């Protein structure tokens, strides 16, 4: 009797209940949508700092923040569309962004990229 009660609790919901949920109705979908809006605001703020930065190191930091926010937006967009292509694009942007940040930092420090 206890085993039957445990298996009935672990069973999936009936199809009638599962079919009433529309795509985008789950809590995770709503959280991803709200997160996309928040990351969009962060992208705009990073772009503002990139354009108005008082110094070159501030602009490099804003560019670094901009690409990190872009990675977050791509991952969230991939979660929303259930597509793995956006995760691969985020990985490529992460690699290129890291190399770009290192090169810009070396240029600011030494005024020479190649040693």
Image (cartoon, grey):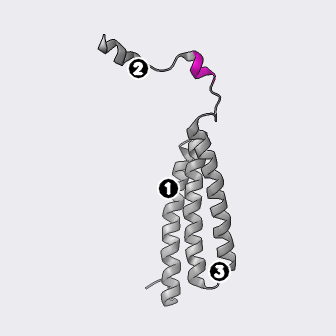
Q: Quadrant of residue 57?
A: bottom right
Q: Residues within 10 Å of mark 3 (few under 14, many from 20)?
A: some
- Between 50 and 32, the one lying in front of the other is 32
Q: Going from the N terminus, do you reach mark 3 or mark 2 first?
A: 2
Residue at 53%, 67% in the rendered image? 97
| Magenta span includes 7 | no
Q: Which quarter of the rendering shows the C terminus?
A: bottom left
Left or right? Give the position of 1 relative to 39: left
Label 1 and label 2: CA atoms lie apart by 40 Å
- Between 112 and 41, the one lying in front of the other is 41
- Image coordinates for residue 39, horizontal then vertical, percent: 61, 57
State the residue position of label 2. Answer: 9
- Tag 3–tag 1 contact (CB < 8 Å): no
The range drawn in magenta is 16-20
State the residue position of label 1. Answer: 91
Label for residue 53? 3
> Residue 11, can we see it?
yes
Main SS category, magenta section: helix
Instruction: Indicate which label's residue lies in the foreground, 3 or 1.
Output: 3
In the depicted structure, whether residue 54 falls above or below residue 40: below
In the depicted structure, whether residue 40 falls above or below residue 56: above
Instruction: Indicate which label's residue lies in the foreground, 1 or 2.
Output: 2
Q: Secondary structure at mark 3?
A: loop
């Amino acid at each position: 009797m206890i085993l039957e009660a445990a298996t009935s609790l672990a069973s999936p919901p009936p199809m009638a209940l599962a079919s009433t949920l529309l795509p985008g109705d789950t809590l995770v979908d709503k959280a991803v949508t709200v997160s996309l809006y928040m990351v969009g605001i962060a992208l705009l703020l990073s772009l503002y700092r990139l354009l108005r930065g008082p110094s070159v190191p501030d602009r490099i930091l804003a560019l670094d923040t901009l690409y990190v926010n872009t990675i977050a937006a791509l991952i969230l967009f991939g979660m929303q569309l259930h597509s793995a292509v956006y995760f691969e694009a985020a990985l490529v942007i992460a690699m290129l962004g890291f190399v770009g940040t290192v090169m810009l930092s070396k240029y600011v420090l030494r005024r020479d990229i190649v040693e």
